[in-house]
Amino acid sequence: MDEDGLKAIREELSKVSSDKDYCKSIRPTPLPPILDRILTFVEEEKNPVLLFEGTEYLMSQNDYGDVLKLIDSIRPVISTSGGIMIIPLNKKAMTQREFALLTTGMRGIP
Protein backbone atom coordinates (compact mmCIF):
# COMPACT_ATOMS: atom_id res chain seq x y z
CA MET A 1 0.00 0.00 0.00
CA ASP A 2 1.39 3.43 -0.89
CA GLU A 3 1.11 6.74 0.98
CA ASP A 4 -2.25 7.49 -0.69
CA GLY A 5 -3.71 4.28 0.71
CA LEU A 6 -3.83 2.65 -2.71
CA LYS A 7 -3.04 -1.02 -3.02
CA ALA A 8 -1.43 -2.08 -6.29
CA ILE A 9 -1.58 -5.68 -7.39
CA ARG A 10 0.11 -6.69 -10.61
CA GLU A 11 -0.90 -9.84 -12.43
CA GLU A 12 0.85 -10.52 -15.73
CA LEU A 13 -0.56 -12.68 -18.52
CA SER A 14 2.08 -15.29 -19.25
CA LYS A 15 2.43 -18.94 -20.12
CA VAL A 16 5.49 -18.97 -17.86
CA SER A 17 4.81 -19.26 -14.14
CA SER A 18 6.01 -16.46 -11.87
CA ASP A 19 5.19 -15.91 -8.23
CA LYS A 20 7.52 -13.02 -7.42
CA ASP A 21 6.41 -10.47 -4.80
CA TYR A 22 6.22 -7.61 -7.30
CA CYS A 23 4.44 -9.52 -10.07
CA LYS A 24 2.51 -12.74 -10.24
CA SER A 25 1.68 -14.39 -13.53
CA ILE A 26 -1.58 -15.89 -14.67
CA ARG A 27 -2.01 -18.05 -17.74
CA PRO A 28 -4.00 -16.53 -20.62
CA THR A 29 -6.05 -19.73 -20.90
CA PRO A 30 -8.49 -20.74 -19.54
CA LEU A 31 -10.33 -17.49 -18.81
CA PRO A 32 -12.29 -18.41 -15.60
CA PRO A 33 -9.21 -18.13 -13.31
CA ILE A 34 -8.61 -14.62 -14.68
CA LEU A 35 -12.21 -13.68 -13.87
CA ASP A 36 -11.89 -15.20 -10.39
CA ARG A 37 -8.77 -13.16 -9.59
CA ILE A 38 -10.37 -9.96 -10.82
CA LEU A 39 -13.59 -10.57 -8.87
CA THR A 40 -11.59 -11.28 -5.70
CA PHE A 41 -9.64 -8.04 -6.15
CA VAL A 42 -12.81 -6.01 -6.75
CA GLU A 43 -14.57 -7.52 -3.73
CA GLU A 44 -11.62 -6.85 -1.42
CA GLU A 45 -10.88 -3.25 -2.45
CA LYS A 46 -12.84 -0.07 -1.92
CA ASN A 47 -13.39 1.86 -5.19
CA PRO A 48 -11.04 -0.41 -7.15
CA VAL A 49 -9.23 0.71 -10.28
CA LEU A 50 -8.57 -2.12 -12.71
CA LEU A 51 -6.08 -1.61 -15.53
CA PHE A 52 -6.99 -4.47 -17.86
CA GLU A 53 -4.07 -4.75 -20.28
CA GLY A 54 -3.51 -7.53 -22.77
CA THR A 55 -6.92 -7.75 -24.42
CA GLU A 56 -5.36 -8.34 -27.82
CA TYR A 57 -3.11 -11.07 -26.37
CA LEU A 58 -6.12 -12.76 -24.76
CA MET A 59 -7.91 -12.61 -28.11
CA SER A 60 -4.95 -14.35 -29.77
CA GLN A 61 -4.99 -17.14 -27.18
CA ASN A 62 -8.78 -17.57 -26.77
CA ASP A 63 -11.95 -17.26 -28.78
CA TYR A 64 -12.90 -13.59 -29.28
CA GLY A 65 -16.44 -14.28 -28.02
CA ASP A 66 -15.08 -15.72 -24.77
CA VAL A 67 -12.88 -12.66 -24.20
CA LEU A 68 -15.89 -10.41 -24.84
CA LYS A 69 -17.92 -12.43 -22.30
CA LEU A 70 -15.07 -12.08 -19.78
CA ILE A 71 -15.05 -8.29 -20.12
CA ASP A 72 -18.86 -8.16 -20.06
CA SER A 73 -18.78 -10.17 -16.81
CA ILE A 74 -16.32 -7.76 -15.20
CA ARG A 75 -18.01 -4.47 -16.18
CA PRO A 76 -21.12 -4.66 -13.95
CA VAL A 77 -19.07 -5.82 -10.96
CA ILE A 78 -16.70 -2.87 -11.35
CA SER A 79 -19.63 -0.50 -11.80
CA THR A 80 -21.55 -1.65 -8.72
CA SER A 81 -18.39 -1.51 -6.59
CA GLY A 82 -17.79 2.14 -7.44
CA GLY A 83 -14.66 1.21 -9.32
CA ILE A 84 -13.12 2.07 -12.66
CA MET A 85 -11.91 -0.29 -15.36
CA ILE A 86 -9.37 0.98 -17.88
CA ILE A 87 -8.85 -1.12 -21.00
CA PRO A 88 -6.13 0.08 -23.39
CA LEU A 89 -7.03 -1.17 -26.86
CA ASN A 90 -5.24 -1.12 -30.18
CA LYS A 91 -7.97 -0.49 -32.74
CA LYS A 92 -5.73 -1.85 -35.50
CA ALA A 93 -5.38 -5.23 -33.77
CA MET A 94 -9.03 -6.16 -34.32
CA THR A 95 -11.83 -5.75 -36.79
CA GLN A 96 -14.11 -2.73 -36.66
CA ARG A 97 -16.96 -4.98 -35.47
CA GLU A 98 -14.84 -6.51 -32.69
CA PHE A 99 -13.77 -3.07 -31.52
CA ALA A 100 -17.37 -1.81 -31.56
CA LEU A 101 -18.58 -4.79 -29.53
CA LEU A 102 -15.79 -4.41 -26.98
CA THR A 103 -16.38 -0.71 -26.47
CA THR A 104 -20.18 -0.71 -26.33
CA GLY A 105 -21.21 1.04 -23.15
CA MET A 106 -17.71 2.36 -22.44
CA ARG A 107 -16.40 5.88 -22.50
CA GLY A 108 -13.37 6.39 -24.68
CA ILE A 109 -10.30 8.38 -23.75
CA PRO A 110 -8.39 9.53 -26.82
Image: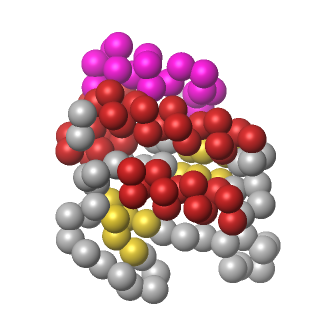
**Display colour scheme:** secondary structure
Range of the magenta residues? 94-109
- Specify the farthest residue to the top: 97
Identity of the residue drawn at 36% across and 36% down: 67
* Figure check: 7 above or below 82: below
Rendered image quadrant of residue 76: top right
52 on left or right of 6: left
Question: In the rendered image, is residue 72 in sight?
Answer: yes
Identity of the residue drawn at 52% across and 37% down: 73
Identity of the residue drawn at 45% across and 26% down: 102
* Figure check: 22 above or below 42: below
Q: Camera-side residue: 33 or 68?
A: 33
95 on left or right of 108: left
Rendered image quadrant of residue 69: top left
Question: In the rendered image, is residue 92 in sight?
Answer: no
Residue 51 part of the magenta segment: no
Residue 63, percent from left and from top: 24, 33
Count of numbered circles on the image: 0
Quadrant including the C terminus: top right
Q: Camera-side residue: 107 or 63?
A: 63
Quadrant including the N terminus: bottom right
Residue 9, percent from left and from top: 55, 70
83 on left or right of 55: right
* Figure check: 74 above or below 30: above
- Specify the farthest residue to the bottom: 21
Residue 71, percent from left and from top: 48, 37
Identity of the residue drawn at 50% across and 41% down: 87
